[in-house]
Image: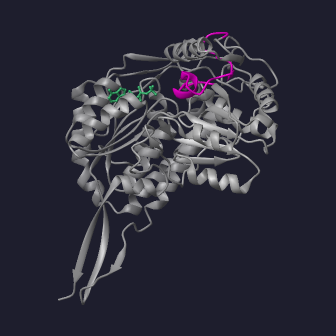
Amino acid sequence: MTTTYTPTPTTVTSPTTPATAATPATVTVRHLIGGEWTGEPTVERRNPARPEEVVAVAPSATTADAHAAVTAAQQAQADWAATPAPARGAILLDAAELLRARHEDVARDLVREEGKTLPEARGEVRRAIDVLRFFGALGWRATGEVLPSGLPDTQVLTRREPLGTAALITPWNFPIAIPAWKAAPALVTGNTVVLKPAELTPLSAHHLASVLVEAGLPGGVLNVVHGRGAVVGDALARDRRVAALSFTGSTTVGQGLHRVLSARRARVQLEMGGKNAYLVLDDADPAAAARVVAAGAFGATGQVCTATSRVYVTPGIREAFTAALVEEAEAHVPGDGLLPGTTLGPVVSEAQLAVDTAAIERAREQGAHVATGGPATQGLLLRPTVLTEVHHSSDAAREEIFGPVVAVLAVDDYEQGLARVNDSAYGLAAGICTTSLARAHDFAARVQAGVVKVNRPTTGLDLNVPFGGVKDSSTNTFREQGTASVDFYTWTKTVYLGHQ
Ligand code: ADP
């Protein structure tokens, strides 16, 4: 995700410092099924920076609720597909305006629910607004083609038909932007949607659904079912009326979903894990390279699928780069994301913190040196962690750590570095810091990753370009975002139009 904010830490914050005079009220979230807000809220979501604060309470759907949502989506489908595309787009544009009007409130709720800093949350809500605008405007763009025919007096044209009902299963790390970038292209192309947000972040998805409903989306066109992945997500995946599933989350869950969807030849798009690598070459400026790597590794508390998590460094720059990276890490101010001065929010949950802490401990056992950071200091606050003396075959270099942890590894030269970058089960994002145009081009051509960054952080994506990876990171068929997402949510029909 793109955030334009550059942190300037001034004060040390603590999760016990009051963010506002009064604790905001708990928001009651409900399912949205067939235009009705339903479901008894039973599951609490607490603020990861203030465990005493219940941010939202949401229902937990049964399999029957999931099926009811698909039924509602199916019933709404024909009318929605028959609605002119510009009219569908107009609803997205109006929803964008509504979200813009409540930008600050939604961003603050996002901080309280997910934990990122307020500037990061503002950036994410801004992204959701822009996504709605982009796809809203796309309603005016013809999507088919008119082509010459080999037959006399005949025209050939292609039509983009909606698939029907799309199920969207989303993670907690970008709780409004990801639902927006999956739902908006699905809706504008005439599909109806059942969204299953992550259990940890029901409120941000609720805000998105609310603006779409208020903007005039007919009942049943967008349905939201909250609850457990193994119950709701699984029920959606197995419902044969679901024509397509777009998922962002862990590789294990994604691979299971892939088996279910592909067994019935339904369309499936998966964005899963990453072990995103950076290559820092001798010709780079060490301080600039450290800034780029730190932004990619520690932004949004490192809880980003494109986060930089391993860095290969050539000998001439290694010492200066590592020292600068440690300095970048230590300049961060972990704390409550709502407090001014905080530059790094808490880890999202105790379970995630336990995973992160265990990964750091395992790295240490496997010979790594913790140059800075380490176990949590307070609550869910984990300081940015730099591991050095990491071996390429160790877990810290091979397995995803979904937190603010980066491993620095030594390589002899560019070729060895590139080989190590590519020697991974994953292939989502990769980057290179160099001043050599030739090296930059060579890297872009030979690296096995869906997103390549030259002298820019691996995180931070534009919304108008394709996004996805290779290997165990993605399905590597249909890309997300930009007009590429239209390919996923439509099928092509070829019409031969003969004159009498
Ligand atoms: P993360 O580790 O980021 O939470 P998950 O893959 O567990 O990644 O979760 C991503 C999304 O997938 C969430 O909405 C979650 O509820 C859902 N999910 C988890 N397990 C399943 C499953 N077995 N079937 C379908 N969806 C699932």
Q: In the rendering, at what x and y percent does residue 254 appear?
A: 37, 34
Q: Is residue 254 positioned above or below 158 on the image? A: above
Looking at the rendering, in which quadrant would you find the C terminus? bottom left
| Residue 263 visible | yes
Is residue 185 on the magenta stretch?
no
Q: Quadrant of residue 297?
A: top right
**Camera-side residue of 125 and 243:** 243
How is colour applied across the structure in the image? one colour
- Residue positioned 35% across, 77% down in the render: 146
Q: Can you say which quadrant of the picture contains the N terminus?
A: top right
Q: Quadrant of residue 68?
A: top left
Q: Residue at x 70, y 40 (%)?
A: 413
Q: Which residues are magenta?
A: 377-404
Name the spot of residue 151 as percent of width and height, x first: 24, 86
Give ligand 1's quarter of the image: top left
Q: Would residue 238 appear left or right of 100 to someone viewing this image?
A: left
Nearer to me, 230 or 452: 452
Q: Position of residue 289 (x, y in %)?
A: 75, 39
Query: Residue 270 appears at what percent x and percent y?
Result: 39, 40
Q: Nearer the viewer, residue 361 or 180?
A: 361
Dominant SS of magenta comes to loop
- Residue depicted at 47% across the width and 55% down the height: 135
